[in-house]
Image: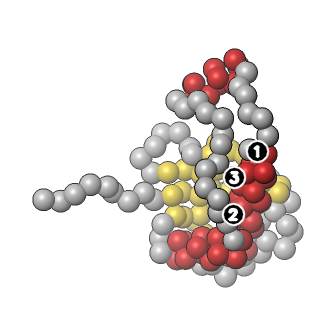
């Protein structure tokens, strides 16, 4: 089934990830499975970007212009040798949800229980809202 995914962060006007289509397996029946499937897609996309980064990188003028509009121009190089472990990434995402680091909404309705049955229909809107910690020092 195809759903629309949006990632937002509190305190920012623009979403971190604009509304994008994502394909979920038909067996996605709980919030836990939804999170695990999304993490799996992101890990796979990261691995593909890392593999493609070894190719000759260059930027066309329209690429520079488009990236300049966002405030950062770069080749998309991924630094670091590590490749994420899928199992650990899923566990970390579930733990972060349980710790209240982000919330998940399905068609503007907050999902609270990880194992409560869900009815995700084709074309549904899923929103992840990340909560950021305050930075700074107290004297």
**Which residue occupies the foreground of this view, 118 or 60?**
60
Q: Is residue 7 above or below residue 62?
A: below
Q: Nearer the viewer, mark 2 or mark 3?
A: 2
**Which residue occupies the foreground of this view, 31 or 92?**
92
Sequence order check, earlier mark of 2 and 3: 3
Q: Quadrant of the C terminus?
A: bottom left
Residue 43 seen in render? yes
Separation of residues labelled 1 and 3 (CA atoms): 29 Å
Whole-percent x and y of residue 65? 63, 20
Residue found farthest to the top: 61
Residue found farthest to the bottom: 115
Q: Is residue 113 above or below residue 101?
A: below
**Which residue occupies the foreground of this view, 30 or 7?**
7
For image coordinates 45% across by 51% down, the residue present is 10
Whole-percent x and y of residue 21? 77, 48
For image coordinates 69% across by 63% down, the residue present is 83
Sequence order check, earlier mark of 2 and 1: 1
Mark 1 neighbour density, 10 Å: few (under 14) some (14–19) many (20 or more): few
Mark on residue 5?
3
Residue 95, quarter of the rendered image: bottom right
* Side (left or right) of 27 relative to 96: right
* Side (left or right) of 64 relative to 50: left
Label 2's element?
loop
Label 3's element?
strand
For image coordinates 77% across by 75% down, the residue present is 29
Q: Which residue is mark 1?
A: 54
Q: Nearer the viewer, mark 1 or mark 3?
A: 1
Whole-percent x and y of residue 71? 52, 30
Q: Which residue is mark 2?
A: 83
Mark 2 neighbour density, 10 Å: few (under 14) some (14–19) many (20 or more): few
Label 1's element?
loop
Residue 103, quarter of the rendered image: bottom right
């Amino acid at each position: 089934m195809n759903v629309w995914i949006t990632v937002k962060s509190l305190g920012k006007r623009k979403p971190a990830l604009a509304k994008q289509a994502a394909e979920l397996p038909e067996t996605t029946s709980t919030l836990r499975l939804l999170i695990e499937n999304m993490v799996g897609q992101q890990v796979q996309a990261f691995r593909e970007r890392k593999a493609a980064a070894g190719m000759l990188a260059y930027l066309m003028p329209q690429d520079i212009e488009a990236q300049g509009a966002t405030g950062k121009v770069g080749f998309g190089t991924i630094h670091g040798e590590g490749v994420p472990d899928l199992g650990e990434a899923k566990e970390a995402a579930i733990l972060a949800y349980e710790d209240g680091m982000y919330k998940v909404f399905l068609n503007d309705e907050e999902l609270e229980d990880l194992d409560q049955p869900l009815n995700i229909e084709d074309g549904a809107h899923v929103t992840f809202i990340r909560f950021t910690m305050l930075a700074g020092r107290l004297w």
